[in-house]
Image (cartoon, rainbow, N blue to C red):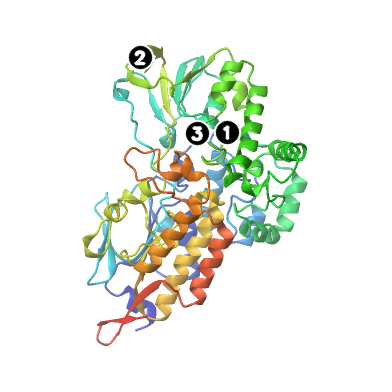
Amino acid sequence: MDNLSILTKGVDTLVTVVGAGFTGLYALFKLRDQMKVPVRVFESAPDVGGTWYWNNYPGARCDIESVHYSYSFDEKLQQEWTWSEKFAAQPEILRYLNHVADRFDLRKDITFNTKVTSVVWNEQEKYWTVTTNQGEVIKSRFFISGVGTLSVPKKPEFPGVENFKGPTLITGNWPKQPISLKGKRVGVIGTGSTGIQLITEIAKEVGELYVFQRTPNYSTPLGNGPTQAEEDLENKAKYTLIRHNARNHFLGVPYNEVQPSALAVSEEERLKVYEDRYQRGGFRLFIDSYQDILFDPKANETVSEFIRQKIHARVKRPEVAELLAPRDYCYGTKRPPMESGYYEVFNQDNVHLIDVKQTPISHIDENGVVVGDQLHEVDVLILATGFDAMTGPLFALGIQGKNHEKLTEKWKEGPRTYLGHTVSGFPNLFLVTGPQSPSVLYNMPLAIEDHVELATGIIQHMIDHQLLEVDADAQAEEEWVNHANELAQASLLPNTDSWYMGANIPGKPRRCLVYLGGAPKYRAICNEMIAKGYQGFHFKAVDPNSTLLQQVS
């Protein structure tokens, strides 16, 4: 019996993957086509795309440059695909993922319209029992979660929302059929990245727009535009270098002009740098201006005030500009949104900004949104209220590890992982871009490739050495949690209520959900772990003659 047969004995498949977005597609290609092992993929949507299938609200767009926000694993794929815009919109990203699925014939091994409802570890037989809402039960040696970080919309928390007589639309689960808002009175609750994109787009056609804002955002220009043919050719000629530089940058994009401190230069020089990064767009102001703006409140105030002044310069009415200019938290401690004409929307006579921090929404009735005792009548209500980030999608899987411990119980005081990728007591489980990994502070397609490579590398190691179980060491997990928390505490992030901290969900433990050491440092740690023989992991092997498990170090 060969090594693979030993690991697949008594199970239906070697690996189960949930999700058919960037993670699921690459994991399927890696496992099926390169490693030649049995794999099943389940996807709740009718087709591929993941986040980019569901998030098709007006204005949905990526804020990482398209040349970087794409797969790097296949050179021919890189050469044959040309992006039409510098920052691709949702329809084009979805077309790209469909192209990938077609190019590698991936759909035939994906089960669509199927949700995974429970994932339970069988300690005696060393496999996961995966159950779906279609009644299928699969025995799988390994389980890879590709559910994403922002895929479970936050539940509406406004009393009476169910009584509203018009359409109530949620940006994270937007209808597939076209929705006309032309000439209608539309209310939007939420002004994060999604709300900003949506508001900018629908303001072009609605009759009256009511924006209910609890917390203003430091939004800066995206800097989008059509892809220039000569630039596309240049990028394709040096894609290897582009990817190398991207992988060695904190954010996963090859910016290289960051300076040490905003406080170490003159005000004139500082403003010159801020203006340059602001005009060039994207994440340059956030990540390519000064290193200390996320760690030193005085340094941060210089960039925060710069953005406030920009808002006041773009919004005609000073009182409206002041409502749109944040003053009670630091720039970058919420995910910095990008915009293309957002602030100018509030110069339109038909756009109304309602401050619901000073006077909260009391309830929603059949005719609209009631703020204090004032009713704002609307025909359509749109909720752009965000997601139960990172832990929410994992909890929805119903994961249960050793000793019948539920992941929800293990993480009741906040996520605990080893490398943001595995969980002690939950063997043979891999979280792609999970909590306490760089994930949302890194270019996601590259982060996903890194994590899929890490998971499949461990699986290949286990095939090669006839190992049935891998589990993170409890001490290694504790040390990683402490390391991730120490990095977070050294930053300004814990001072702000944001989804980075889990603070947007009532009752959710307040814990930093992202690793702040940067992707290059994270990758170096993972490489060192592998070089030391998968340090921090325990493996169990099987004697094929006796089928008795033996502990191995």
Give coordinates of residue 294: x percent, y percent. 58, 45
Crowding at dot 2, Cα within 10 Å, few <14 / some 14-19 / many 20+, comes out as some
Residue under the image location 40 percent in, 81 percent down: 465
The answer to whether 170 appears left or right of 531 in the picture is left
> Which residue, given by chain and number where applicable, does mark 2 sit on?
367
Residue under the image location 46 percent in, 19 percent down: 186
The answer to whether 69 appears left or right of 130 in the picture is right
N-terminal of the two: label 3 or label 2?
3
Q: Amino acid at mark 3?
A: Gly
Q: Quadrant of the N terminus?
A: bottom left
Mark 1, secondary structure of its residue: loop
Q: Is residue 420 visible?
A: no
Point out which mark residue 218 bears: 1
Give coordinates of residue 48: x percent, y percent. 45, 48
Task: Between residue 28 and residue 355, name the one nearer to us.
Answer: 355
Point out which mark residue 192 bears: 3
Q: Is residue 487 above or below residue 311?
A: below
Q: Label 3, label 2: how many angstroms apart (C-alpha)?
A: 25 Å
